Amino acid sequence: MFDVLDKSLEYGRSLGPEYIELRAEDILLTTIQFDDGQVKNLNQRIEKGVAIRVLSNGAWGFVSTSDFENLNQYIDRAVALAKSAAASRREPIKLAETKAITDTVKLSVKESPIDLSNEEKVEWMSQVYKQIKDYDERIGAVSLKLRDGWGKKYLVTSSGHKIEFDVGFVHHYAWVTGKEGASITAARDEVGSTSEGWEFLKKTQGAENIGKRVANRVKLQLEAVAAKGGSFPTVLAPHVIGVVAHEALGHLSEADLTVQSSFGGKLGQKVANDFVNMTDDGTLPGGFGTSKYDDEGTPTSRVEIIKDGILTELLTNREYAARMGLRPTGNARAQDYRFMPIIRMRNTFFEKGDWADDELFEGIKFGYLCVDFRGGQAELNASFQVGVQEAYEIVNGEVGRPVKDLSISGIATDTLFKIEGIGKGTFEFEQGRCGKGQEAFISAGGPMIRVSEGGITFGGKK
């Protein structure tokens, strides 16, 4: 592969652009849709192609193709696109300097998903389905989706990068409904890994654990009491505080969005209570968003977004690092060769505090413990809304009855100052996907966090 890419890179250099990047991939993808006990769809495809990105006359030109035989003509197109775009740019794009890197990144797993037959994968999904259906007679529709991929990526650039990556992932998603009388509810479960193979689903997660976990969420919703509307003290568990970190705050720290967001112009300023720390870490072992390098060849890093309550760093690629005078953090990511790399989070989380778990509940006469979320969204003004699929009342400092139909909302930049305490216990990350015009695997989380009344608004009956 490098022979083809190197020759085309040299041809691109001869055209005189400021920068040229060729990013190729050859990956086998398998998707199985398993609905209500039977295979709805099973397909495999090879994603093999090249992304060509050229910076010429201070503007980007981008072309993707699966035609490896005629790369030079696509490079011509990319250069022409860049020159056309340059005519309308007010300021030329520049790139931050990075060290040239030559490397081979290996991925070692116990069971590669491509070594398993599709029959074995379907059988595993059948086990998940059985666990769900056997859990409670009120369980209704069950939709399961399994995806896996394995292959290689290659990167060569005029900055001197030459990197070969092993690429692999497994990803499982479940959506389950339940009904009792007129009451209908649903719950989701999503897990994935880019560092383990099939063993992640088979042993680390397990068909029984996944099935019972999502079925129990449906059962709790069917048996829960209705939520009260208003604002109350709350304790947010790892998955829910993770979605707040990602959706409501993390996107504000992506440098291409920061200028338009509530974090715009606030670098170096206080944005949270002094004991609040939030990080995005591309080097986190086992993180769903972890990688050694980003799609520009920049090493990934630990980015301390909020440090001791101060907005300290932003997530960058080479373009925005140069534009804003910041370091390249290794957050340029592309879904695949059909997309340009853009700034994306990786593993975003609140750091641990110094409160014991029981201290987080002390003194709360009435409030809510929010354990897991069904979905969430946020805006650049830091407003957020999250549907909670597992929650409990807190009464006189004790966890009480499960709650249904609960949603939380607020302004995250205000919520940061309403955080009263941060747990010191270990926590699991939520594994999921982020959409920003293209898909990226991410992790998000944090310890349990207590938010005072006024920091979170609850949807429900007043």
Image (tube, rainbow, N blue to C red):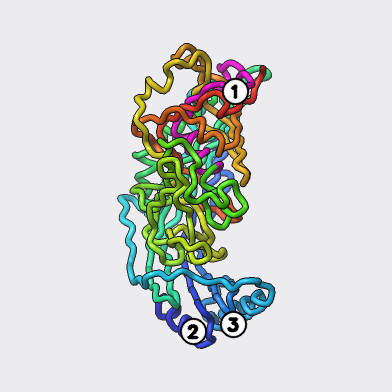
For marks 1 and 2 on the same chain, the one whose residue lies earlier in the sequence: 2
Say the numbered circle drawn on residue 319.
Answer: none
For marks 1 and 3 on the same chain, the one whose residue lies earlier in the sequence: 3
Badge 2 element: helix
Q: Residue 136: percent from the left, percent from the top?
A: 52, 21
Q: Is residue 67 left or right of residue 159?
A: right
Let me know if residue 40 appears in the view: yes
Residue 373 in the image: above or below residue 336: above
For marks 2 and 3 on the same chain, the one whose residue lies earlier in the sequence: 2
Residue topped by disc 3 = 76
Q: Quarter holding the C terminus?
A: top right
Point 41% across, 64% down: residue: 298
Q: Residue 381: percent from the left, percent from the top?
A: 63, 44
Between 302 and 29, the one lying in front of the other is 302
The CA distance from mark 2 to mark 3 is 11 Å
Q: Which residues lie in the magenta part?
A: 220-248
Residue topped by disc 2 = 13
Question: Which image quadrant is residue 143 in?
Answer: top right
Residue topped by disc 1 = 231
Between 386 and 68, the one lying in front of the other is 386
Q: Is residue 241 magenta?
A: yes
The type of residue carrying mark 3 is Asp
Between 374 and 180, the one lying in front of the other is 374
Question: Which image quadrant is residue 160 in?
Answer: bottom left
Let me know if residue 177 appears in the view: no
Badge 1 element: strand
Query: For the view shown, which residue lies furthest in the top direction?
Result: 396
Residue 179 in the image: above or below residue 207: above
Q: Is residue 33 magenta?
A: no
The type of residue carrying mark 1 is Ser
The CA distance from mark 1 to mark 3 is 59 Å
Residue 186 in the image: above or below residue 70: above
